[in-house]
Image (cartoon, helix red, strand yellow):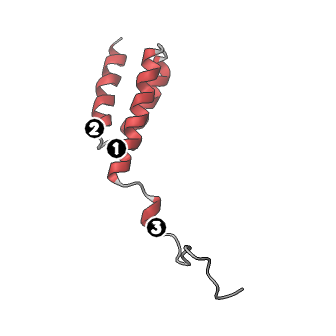
Amino acid sequence: PAGHEIPGMSSATSHPAASQPSPLNYETLAARQLELAKDYISAKMNDKAITELAYILQDYPQTKAAKEARQLLDQLSAK
């Protein structure tokens, strides 16, 4: 019925900021993507690794993982 709320549930709408990852989350997401790229390198799947590394540089350019991704990408490109 109208006017009744479920206990523990808020009637407020979601916050726009909640849908955007925080900088800490960007670091986590980029680190996970970097691990995937490293797994591809270990499996000699360099084309897939390059794709993942480029994704990190495009989507998470200010992260620690991006710095390492750049180095790995340079190494793979030199081969």
Q: Secondary structure at mark 3?
A: helix
Residue 6 percent location from the top left of the image: 62, 77
Is the residue 25 above or below the residue 15 in the image?
above
User: Mark 1 and mark 2 in contact (Cβ < 8 Å)?
Assistant: yes
Could you classify mark 1 by the number of other residues whose Cα lies within 10 Å: few (under 14), some (14-19), or many (20 or more)? Answer: some
Amino acid under disc 2: Lys
Res. 28 visible in picture = yes
Name the residue carrying label 3.
Answer: 16
The residue at the point 33 percent across, 52 percent down is 23
Quadrant of image for the C terminus = top left
The residue at the point 41 percent across, 54 percent down is 21
Q: Residue furthest bottom?
A: 3
The residue at the point 58 percent across, 76 percent down is 7
Res. 54 visible in picture = no
Left or right for 71, reference 2: left
Q: Specify the quadrant of the image occupied by residue 39.
A: top left
Could you classify mark 2 by the number of other residues whose Cα lies within 10 Å: few (under 14), some (14-19), or many (20 or more)? Answer: some
Q: N-terminal of the two: label 1 or label 3?
A: 3
Name the residue carrying label 2.
Answer: 64
Residue 16 percent location from the top left of the image: 46, 67
Give the Cα distance between marks 2 and 1.
7 Å
The residue at the point 38 percent across, 49 percent down is 25
Name the residue carrying label 1.
Answer: 27
Could you classify mark 3 by the number of other residues whose Cα lies within 10 Å: few (under 14), some (14-19), or many (20 or more)? Answer: few
Quadrant of image for the N terminus = bottom right
Q: Which mark is residue 49?
A: none
Q: N-terminal of the two: label 3 or label 2?
A: 3
